[in-house]
Image (spheres, rainbow, N blue to C red):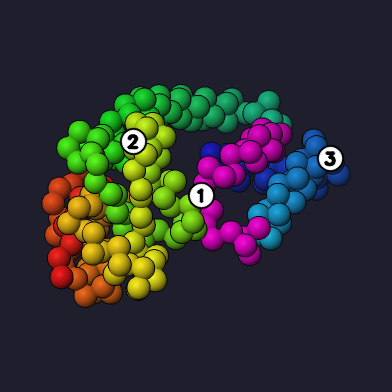
Amino acid sequence: MFALISVSFVWLRTQYRYRRGIPYFREMLLLLSIFVCALVIVALLSLKTYMFFGRYFIAFFPVVYLLIALLLAPLMRRSLCSKSIFTGLLVVNLVIFGFGHKELKYTPKISSRMVSQIYKNKFRGKEIFVIALEGFPPVTMPAMYGFYVNRVFGLNVPVTELFWLDDESRNRALTRKENAFIWMPNCTKAKLQKVSSKWNRSLGVYGRVSDVCILKISD
């Protein structure tokens, strides 16, 4: 796709030099202006928002798709080779989308849901501790990491995120660790070592589900 877009740019530049006109110029300029305005708004929001994810920008995709379509249209009308390449890319992307859709429908692959199911079946009644090094706003973490347990399964369990607590609050919470279900999302050896070093405590991996660790903490 990048190669096709590059060729289109070259072709349009040639048309401009010889014909003094670019097809769909006003339409592309309008779409580009909308996209640039959206990026400026995002840049301003980023001053107050800690983290962005790719899915936040899905609303901008129609503008990008239309811009690319208008950019490619003149070339597609005049080149059988470009049409063949584009058709091949379309087929490949449909196959990739099909596999991705199949993976999303297989809900047990969602590790947070699996861990919540384990909690429901084996550890129900215990408080939940989460050790999340990701930089989400701390105020949102109990609702986010307790979603399946409390909103889906309706267990109404208190959820405490430990990593972003101040030392006093964390130490007070850890006095209840023997009666808590403790897990770390996106668990890696480096993260475990970082937490262990910062807290001066030993973290043992009691179990692992996909990219989630179920932990035991000892002094």
Q: Which amino acid does label 2 sit on?
A: Leu
Callout 3: SS: helix
- List the residue tagged with mark 2: 155
Look at label 1 and name its amino acid.
Phe
Any part of residue 148 in sight? no
Circle number at residue 53: 1
**First of labels 3, 1 by sequence position:** 3
User: Disc 2 or disc 3, which is closer to the eye?
Assistant: 2
Q: Which amino acid does label 3 sit on?
A: Arg
Q: Name the residue under label 3.
A: 26
Q: Magenta region, mostly helix, strand or loop?
A: helix
In the rendered image, which quarter is residue 187 located in?
bottom left
Which is nearer the eye, 37 or 8? 37
Image depth: mark 3 or mark 1 in front:
1
Give the quarter of the figure containing the C terminus: bottom left
Q: Is mark 1 on a helix, strand or loop?
A: loop
Classify 189 as above or below 85. Answer: below
Stretch in magenta = 45-71
**Is residue 169 visible from the viewing direction of this image?**
yes
Q: Which of 57 and 191 is in front in this view?
A: 191
